[in-house]
Image (spheres, helix red, strand yellow):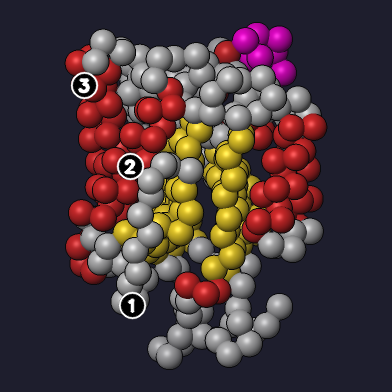
Amino acid sequence: MMPIRESPTGGIPRKPRDTELDVFGVTHVGKVRKENQDHFLIASLYKQLTVHQTSIPAGTLSASDTDRLAFLAMVADGVGGSVGGEEASRFALDGIAAYLTRSVHCYYSADPNDDAEFTHVLQEGAMRVHARLTQRGAVDDRAGMATTLTAFLGVWPRAYVLQVGDSRFYTLRHGTLHQVSRDQTVAEELISAGVIRRSDPGHERWRHVLSSAIGGPEASPVVTAIENDWNHVHLLCSDGLTKHVSDEQIAERLRTMTSARQVCEALLQDALDGGGSDNISIVVGRAMPQADG
């Protein structure tokens, strides 16, 4: 890999330009479900939202010649079997994107060494979307329409991971895969409380029962702040991938990837080959320096 130039002030490597971002997303109905209730979104935040790729219908691609303030990637998985799962996942991504765009002032005013502002914005956005979706379900007599939501907000050289539900966020750093998000499931809550162990037979029973969801009985958004770096590969996915593809296989795919698109398509095929029992959504991103950078 080419060396990364430091910023003019030294210390922090320069922020990647838009043309140096290798990002791609895929979504697939799988082999069993009749409807794809997953959605994803990849976008840049300038003084407006510029969408690069999304599964949401009728998206608008707009142009901007200003400096990128932040980069946004999201995956939402409508709760399987619930009424309006597809609508819920689409609604969540629309709502978070709109809220972050309206909150653009925080990217100017926040201290880059203080994570509190971005944590607050993401948690507040998630709770507002949760309240609106809950209200919408009640008005339309579709109580229970709900979705997971995992979002990556890159504000160089930091990144913020928003987690509600059991879709996941991973990073590959120096060849090692790290699961940054924590599944918000009944199984994980019971393990944390010391009620059961991961090896217990009862673990499997509760592994896919959500303890937190946008639009569900409870939403508990968690934001994790991490360092971002040119050597990191980021992956967001719904559980349609992790039900069939192990962390070891994901890590090997990311270590040997030739592009974000190539690895997304390879992981999708792995999930389909493994059974494809659920909808599958995958977003992978990394920064790749150019020769004239």
Local secondary structure at mark 2:
helix
Local secondary structure at mark 1:
loop
Instruction: Locate residue 121, reporting x and y percent.
Output: 26, 49
- The part of the chain drawn in magenta is 197-205
Which residue is labeled 1 in the image?
65
**Vertical order, 130 against 94 (above or below):** above
Instruction: Locate residue 253, reporting x and y percent.
Output: 76, 51
Q: Distance between the residues labelled 2 and 1?
A: 23 Å
- Sequence order check: which comes first, mark 3 or mark 1? 1
**Vertical order, 42 against 111 (above or below):** above
**Vertical order, 149 against 8 (above or below):** above
- Sequence order check: which comes first, mark 2 or mark 1? 1
- Sequence order check: which comes first, mark 2 or mark 3? 2
Q: In which quarter of the image is the N terminus?
A: bottom right
Which residue is labeled 3 in the image?
135
Does 198 lie within the magenta span?
yes
Magenta stretch, main secondary structure, is loop
> Disc 3 or disc 1, which is closer to the eye?
1
Out of 290 and 200, give the one closest to the viewer: 290
- Amino acid tagged 1: Asp
- Amino acid tagged 2: Asp
* Residue at (76, 25) in percent of width and height: 275
Does 182 lie within the magenta span?
no
Out of 195 and 264, give the one closest to the viewer: 264
